[in-house]
Amino acid sequence: AVDIPFYFLLGILAGGLGVLFNQGVLSSLALNRRWKWSMAWRMGMVGLVSGLMIAFAPPIFRNNAGLRDFLITEEVGIQQTSLVFLAHFSLTLLVYGTGAPGGVFAPALVLGLALGYWVGGIKTLLIGAASTTPYALVGMGAFFTAVARVPVTAIVIVFELTGNFSLVLPLMIGSVTAYGVAETLKTGSLYQHLLEASGIPLRDEDNSYDFLSNLRAGDVMQRQVETLEAGMTVEETFQFFSGSLHHGFPVVDEGQLVGLVTETHLAELGRASNDLPLQEVMTMRPVTVQPYSPLSDVLYLMDRYQISHLPVTEGRRLVGIITRSDLIHATADRLSARQLPREQQPEPSYVVYQHRAPATGNGRLLVPLANPETVKALLQMAAAIAQERRLEIECLHIVTVPQHLSPAQADADLQESLQLFEEARAIARAWEIPLHVQIRIAHDAALAVLETINERHINLLLMGWKGSTSTPGRIFGDVVDRLIHEASCDVMLVKLGTPPHAYPLPSAMSPTWIIPMAGGPNVKLALRLLPALNLLANSPEMMLCQVYPPEQETFDITPLEEAANRLKTTLSKEVTAIPIRSHSVSEAVLRLAEEENSELVMIGASRESLLKQALNGNIPEAIASGLQCTVILVRSALIVDS
């Protein structure tokens, strides 16, 4: 009975040290993957370190099988046992981290023997003479349990080795205690974590596993949120609601969340409160969640406070909103994903390098960098937009690998990526813009961009576009098509012109910019971006044009003139409104751009109209391929009705 507390102590130590051992193995493997040395060099360096340690260690270390016998037969002391444990622990991590073929079964047994011998020696010092052999054998089973999480297997292995029935109860105490401690500290065995690190999940997709339990608020929220300004009146708020399909809006003040207003709230106020400021009637200090909050917290808060709109914030900055319809869409998406065979589900990208700047902006602008020849132009545009709209810039470089290689294990040369980032840092410093950078290894470049958009709460995606594609069945190409269709943020595609009009920059002559109008949110986005791009040019002349069918006898140019007047007020310069009669939109825009020697054409197009345009000759591609100047295509954020 006096031994039982020490067996519990042995189990606790084995559980804690077993978790530390597992984490050390995983960290050692991850560290070695980041090194670009060949396996031969890694093995050589680790072999040199191991050889030097063993050369200066006592002779007992040079016979591994004999060492186990010494520990069992009590032929070593506590001091030597401690040295054995530390040496085997550290050397195993070093050796396994090289990636060379090998295992941890034998080292785990030696570590368990040493730990058990050490606890038995402590018990002997405290209470009196007793054999340490049972403790060494129990330690062997307990430590292996903590590493592999197989308590029954560990008990059977040790019992088969000894055939001693008196060890069964101590083995049960030590192994079960080690298992409980290890699972409390870190769930899962070393072998499970090694498989998951290699991209091989072990969850059974056909069981009753709750497929929504691993979702976070940031996975289901809408990132592009229509908001109200705190300085608005209730009457202006009524008008805003009447022109929107949404039933609730966050209230912000300089990008910071200050309140929430819903349609139900306004109905309770009535029209008598029209003249009141919105900040006097809105819901102050609304319930919020963080992007990393689990979905269970979201469901609990919505049910507890009976709310249908839950803002998502980083600090006080609004980064998204969750509605009940978002939860329904998330459930439907996950159900659809689960119906795909596992081999058809793409493997996520893997971040191999990242650097974060202080988060001081009201949002983030993502710039995927690929072509060194266009990096400067794209970053100049990004910096101008980021400065004007108070955004942070997120630079992304994607290294693609073949499908048979796991992104988490593939080696990649990062030199090109780091060179691109140096140019990005220089431009960001010149404009005094916060810059974040990351490198991802991926099978699919479009998927890597979409993952970055979701994880980093991107507000605007700005990327290069060659203006045409040779891919059958595609409008703009594999990557661009998917991003236009799926990216939740605003999208800005830039086809840079050929010299001397490579991109808008100050020039001796006043350039001409043409913006075709077709109505809708995408044109509004184009007009919002123009003031920022205006910073890069020498007072460009703005022309808004709209193409009308020749057979239409009369047409209303009021929206065109109103848009021109608003832009004129914003830029404090003359803006020309030009109605055009033509059977072909692309031909009309091309003709106008050539006549005016335009340096930039900006087109707004929705996701649905792009597909319709493809059937009629693909208007954006026809314009982009037919012009030598810079062409920008914008698509506003995808907002789900709530």
Image (spheres, rainbow, N blue to C red):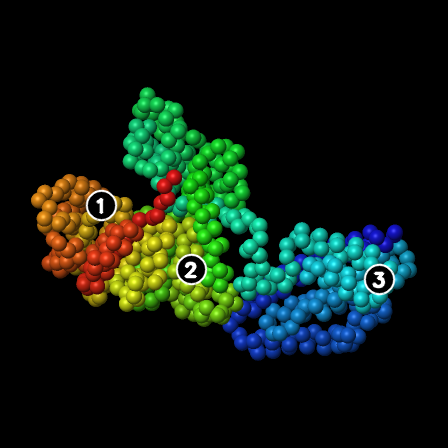
Task: Quickly name the residue at label 3.
Answer: 134
Q: Which three-letter amino acid code belongs to the residue tagged 3?
A: Pro
Q: Is residue 550 left or right of residue 530?
A: left
Q: Can you give x and y, in whole percent of width and height, for residue 566 in the image? A: 20, 41
Q: Is residue 511 left or right of residue 308?
A: left
Residue at the image position 22 percent from the left and 45 percent from the top:
519
Residue at the extreme top of the image, as rendered: 272
Estimate how packed mark 1 is, as few (under 14), some (14 to 19) or many (20 or more) residues with alpha carbons within 10 Å.
Answer: some
Q: Which three-letter amino acid code belongs to the residue tagged 2?
A: Ala
Q: Is residue 82 above or below residue 246?
A: below
Residue at the image position 57 percent from the left and 57 percent from the top:
203
Q: Can you give x and y, in whole percent of width and height, for residue 339 in the image? A: 48, 55
Q: Is residue 147 above or below residue 636?
A: below
Q: Earlier in the sequence, mark 2 or mark 1?
A: 2
Q: Given contact means CB atoms under 8 Å apart, are the residues at marks 3 and 1 in contact?
A: no
Q: Confirm whether residue 1 shows in the render.
A: yes
Task: Quickly name the residue at label 1.
Answer: 519
Tag on residue 539? none
What is the C-alpha distance between the residues marked 2 and 3? 54 Å
Estimate how packed mark 3 is, as few (under 14), some (14 to 19) or many (20 or more) residues with alpha carbons within 10 Å.
Answer: many
Task: Quickly name the residue at label 2.
Answer: 448
Q: Secondary structure at mark 1?
A: loop
Q: How many marks?
A: 3
Q: Is residue 553 above or below residue 474?
A: above
Q: Earlier in the sequence, mark 2 or mark 3?
A: 3
What is the C-alpha distance between the residues marked 3 and 1? 82 Å
Q: Secondary structure at mark 2?
A: helix
Q: Can you give x and y, in whole percent of width and height, for residue 294 in the image? A: 53, 45
Residue at the image position 49 percent from the left and 60 percent from the top:
341
